[in-house]
Image: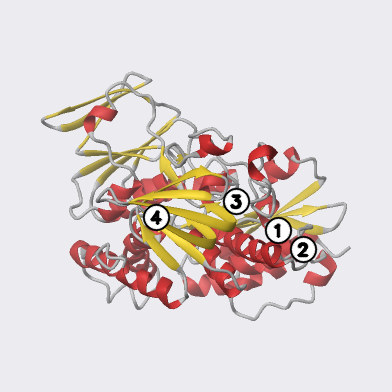
Amino acid sequence: MTETEYDLIIIGGGAVAENVADRAVQGGLTAILIESELVGGECSYWACMPSKALLRSGIALRAAQNVEGTKQAVTGDIDVAATLKRRDSFTHDWDDSSQVEWVEGAGIGLLRGHGRLTGVKRVSVEASDGTVTELTARHAVVVSTGSDPVLPDVPGLADVSPWTPREATSAKVIPASLAIIGGGVVAVEMATAYATFGCNVTIIARSGLLGTQEDFAAEMVGESLKKLGVTLSLGVTPTNARRGDDGVALTLSDGSEVVAAEVLVATGRQPRSTDIGLETVGLTPGDWLDVDDTLLVRGDTNHHHGWLYATGDVNHRVLLTHQGKYQARAAGDVIAARALGHAVHDGAWGAHAATADHEAVPQVTFSDPEVASVGLTSRAAEKAGYTTRVVDYDLGWVAGASLQADGYEGKARMVVDEKRKVVLGVTFVGQDVSELLHAATVAIVGEVPIDRLWHAVPAYPTMNEIWLRLLETYGRP
């Protein structure tokens, strides 16, 4: 057993953990990552990157087919093998050498193994060969362990070897059929990708599709999925699962049955916190870690004394990689500031506060059409007590969109706080709308008054002209 001391210890080595360490090291501290799998984590190897690589080929193909002149040139079907090979290039065939090289180049330590808290500012790391290293943090420990899929309590489901999102994004062979349990982002994206590959896809979603988005987003995506050949079984849930010679048979709550070669479970996430020693510092294993806006863990002050932080999925604020990395930047900076006695700016929108987590979160569902949203939906704004006005506009009426695709179909919605006359939320649905999103994010984070937005002139003819059309529909004060 060896002992080592660092200013900051981070349990986890994914994209979020890397950003915490990088900011802390740039701030003048020493830091070490502890990782039991691949450095770079879920996003790099089993989520964001491989999933978007799987989706891109089909979306690009259909975009070309939507424009006169190019559709005549597109005469073949998608090359599934080439698409999977391209996906593998983004994961480096699940080899993290390049990520390790970046970590070392950034001056960050790395220890492979399973990390567990053993007390105040102490972490034990068990390597795969059983070797144990005891680490001590001079200033802070960050838990950045992410989350795992939730397996619904359906009789027989665990026995049929269901896919999780990991298997869906890393599959080497496309099954003839796939049943997807769930209706969220993962379910919609994987249904889009696998249907494109010629797989017979069925979505089973008790609460419908994309429940946290505006209703029109779910409707438009649902119609598109059906055009791709996806069967939507909404408002029902599996009651039993069994694997036979024909694949997995799922009995549904309405008495019907779905049979598929494989079944993908995409019904939510749970914190990866069951075996990281939380009990040694007065916290409950398996719980989400509740944090303040500086990502400091709330809890038993007799144990914490301001040294334990949690970033990314494990704190349950926003389960999105870009938001976790945003938290990481705030956490790394504030840990360095506190350690070195520098000023801490932890008020709303301060450098050390993850304020955007609350009502300014951007998100893209890479379905076809895409769904890009930021801030509050009309339902969420109403529930939060805002006095709002909702403005809708057909994206197909915008010149830039009509040039993008013949017969362009899309919709935009802007939710305005009528008391402050600022934008609370924006949702776009349509081809390539993800590239519209950051302007909306800036408007919301900056609380730009509607009056001032009139002076942000969109270039013509681009899809960004949607901003002018939304403002015209809203009307000059």
Which structural element holds mark 1?
loop
Distance Cα–Cα, label 4 vs label 3: 20 Å
Label 3 belongs to which residue? 309
Distance Cα–Cα, label 2 vs label 3: 17 Å
Question: Please, is residue 313 above or below residue 275 in the view?
Answer: below
Q: Earlier in the sequence, mark 4 or mark 3?
A: 4
> Disc 4 vs disc 2: which is toward the camera?
2
Q: Is residue 437 left or right of residue 455?
A: left
Total count of labels: 4
Which structural element holds mark 3?
strand
Label 2 belongs to which residue? 345
In the image, what residue occupies the spot 51% across and 49% down? 122
Q: Amino acid at mark 2?
A: His
Pointers 1 and 2 in contact (CB under 8 A)? yes
Q: Is residue 189 left or right of residue 346?
A: left
Q: Earlier in the sequence, mark 3 or mark 1?
A: 3
Label 4 belongs to which residue? 42
Label 1 belongs to which residue? 353
